[in-house]
Image: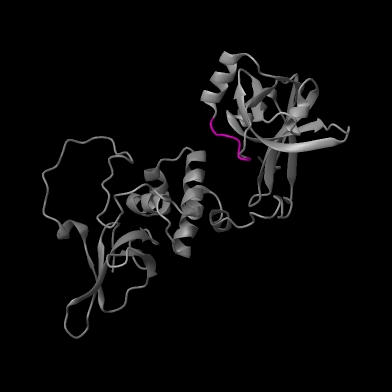
Amino acid sequence: MRAHLGDQLVIESPTTGATRRDGEIVGLHHDDGTPPYDVRWSDTDEVTLVFPGPDAHIRHAETAQPEAIPEPSRPATDETQPRSAATPRSGTPNPGDIGRRVAAERHRQRLSRGETARRARMSPDYLAYLEEQPADPSLATLVRLADALGTSVSALRGGGMDLPPGQGYALLHPQLRDLSPEECRTLLSTHGVGRIAVSGADGRPVVVPVNYEVADDAIVFRTAPHSAPAAAVGREVAFEVDHVDDAMSQGWSVLAVGPASVVTEPDAVRELTQRAHTTPWAGGERDMWVSVRPTSLTGRRITPADQ
């Protein structure tokens, strides 16, 4: 038995020959199209891992539809991919936690939906369904998605959310190297979550995570007056950003040091607010923009010694 994405798996009644159940094959586990398959059943819209028995056969997509007049060729994009009849079409997308994590990791790596589906050997329609609906994919599907995205099944499921990063073992031969200022700027990117280190009102050190933006080589963040991050104003502060790859025991950190000041010019405040990628995750009224202009920018990265 060999199948392609989009084919139908049909299970017949052994006694009458009537169709007992059918579904679209949305995931392959072997390049040659042999079982098992991820099947989205037409009666429940659920996707399960199926090892077909002797009462099952494949209805190939090209034989189930009349021949169509070919259209002029055009580049394939996610927007031009046809959606299958089983994929929900109406309503606002309501992704589950797994779908959000898959989409976030895909966007982080700048992968199209079509390319991710190709790497994971599944239908782009099914990947769209996972990202847009509260689906419950099989373990086999998660394994292929994790492999396609270079992450782990645990990460896609949200495992370790309540644990600090770095729970794994160190590399056998790690290499710690300094990063150039240009590499540091690249890793800071345009926005993210970093940590501002300041001296509190009582003189004791405080480190607080904040959502930050990078604007004109300055690191800016929103906070509330009299909050802990607001204590940075008028002082030289440290701002740190890092990333830890638990699966590979690798990571990097960037440290920016410089004076902090309040952004008061109305046009500048308006522009920062309009350009912001997100509102502060902490919520509440946080309309005070603080700017840190680095006078020192350093960083380090841990990799295997042979890289």
> Relative to 106, is 241 above or below?
above
Quadrant housing the C terminus: top right
Left or right of 10: which side holds 221? right
Task: Give the residue at the far bottom of this rendering.
Answer: 15
Left or right of 6: which side holds 115? right
Quadrant housing the N terminus: bottom left
Q: Position of residue 206 (x, y in %)?
A: 81, 36
Q: Which residues are magenta?
A: 277-282
Q: Position of residue 96 (x, y in %)?
A: 46, 54
Q: What residue is at 33 percent from the left and 64 percent from the top?
A: 39
Q: Is residue 109 visible?
A: no
Left or right of 10: which side holds 45? right
User: In terms of depth relative to the viewer, which is nearer, 175 or 197?
Assistant: 197
> Relative to 118, is 48 above or below?
below
User: In terms of depth relative to the viewer, which is nearer, 186 or 257?
Assistant: 257
Task: Give the residue at the far right of this rendering.
Answer: 203
Q: What residue is at 53 percent from the left and 54 percent from the top?
A: 156
Q: What residue is at 60 percent from the left and 28 percent from the top?
A: 213
Q: Position of residue 298 (x, y in %)?
A: 74, 27
User: In terms of depth relative to the viewer, which is nearer, 108 or 265?
Assistant: 265
Q: Position of residue 45 (x, y in %)?
A: 32, 63
> Relative to 305, is 95 above or below?
below
Q: Main secondary structure of the magenta part?
A: loop
Q: Is 283 colored magenta in this rendering?
A: no
Q: How many marks?
A: 0
Q: Is residue 191 visible?
A: yes
Image color mode: one colour
User: In terms of depth relative to the viewer, which is nearer, 253 or 85?
Assistant: 85
Residue 24 is drawn in which quadrant? Answer: bottom left
